[in-house]
Image (cartoon, rainbow, N blue to C red):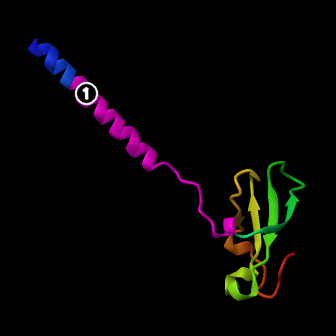
């Protein structure tokens, strides 16, 4: 009787530890990027001529919300369904006087 009790306690504790480990793993999983660009309307989308799942886009920021870095309005995504638009890397940016439409 005591052995059965300890066995049940062991199973419960083991189950709780496994659940905690899985929840912890879920919490620290890679999260989707929360880009500021997701809240902006993409006005032009161009599919890549080289890769099938690559799309380029640009956005225009309203005059009152415009920041200095908004001149760089060129973004890309690998999935239109995800709506996760990413800015191009720093070394491939346009100059500060160019705006893509």
In the rendered image, the residue lying farthest to the right is 49
Instruction: Check the picture and name the quadrant holding the C terminus.
Output: bottom right
In this view, 37 is above or below 2: below
Q: Where residue 100 sits in the image (x, y, percent)? A: 85, 76
Question: Which picture quadrant has residue 69?
Answer: bottom right
Question: Which picture quadrant has residue 94?
Answer: bottom right
Assess disc 1: are there few (<14), some (14-19) or many (≥20) residues with their C-alpha within 10 Å of its C-alpha: few
Q: Is residue 30 magenta?
A: yes
Residue holding disc 1: 12
Q: Is residue 14 magenta?
A: yes
Q: Is residue 51 left or right of residue 29?
A: right
In this rendered view, identify the residue nearer to me: 53 or 26.
26
Q: Where residue 63 sits in the image (x, y, percent)? A: 75, 87
Q: Secondary structure at mark 1?
A: helix
How many numbered marks does the figure carry?
Answer: 1
Q: Is residue 39 left or right of residue 6?
A: right
Q: Residue at x 68, y 58 (%)?
A: 84
Q: Where residue 80 sits in the image (x, y, percent)? A: 77, 53
In this view, 55 is above or below 40: above
Q: Where residue 60 sits in the image (x, y, percent)? A: 79, 77
Q: Is residue 7 left or right of residue 48?
A: left
Q: Residue at x 76, y 75 (%)?
A: 73
In this rendered view, identify the residue nearer to me: 21 or 90.
21
Question: Which picture quadrant has residue 64?
Answer: bottom right
In the rendered image, the residue lying farthest to the top is 1
In the rendered image, the residue lying farthest to the left is 2
Q: Residue at x 35, y 39 (%)?
A: 21
Range of magenta residues: 10-39
In this view, 48 is above or below 69: above
């Amino acid at each position: 009787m005591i052995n059965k009790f300890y066995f049940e306690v062991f199973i419960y504790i083991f189950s709780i530890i496994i659940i905690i480990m899985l929840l912890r793993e879920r919490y620290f999983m890679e999260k989707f990027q929360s880009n500021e660009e997701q809240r902006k309307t993409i006005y032009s989308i161009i599919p890549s001529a080289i890769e099938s799942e690559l799309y380029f886009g640009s956005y225009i920021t309203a005059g009152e919300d415009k920041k200095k870095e908004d001149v760089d309005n060129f973004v890309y995504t690998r999935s239109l369904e995800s709506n996760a638009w990413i800015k191009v890397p720093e070394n491939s940016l346009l100059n500060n006087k160019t705006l893509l439409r």
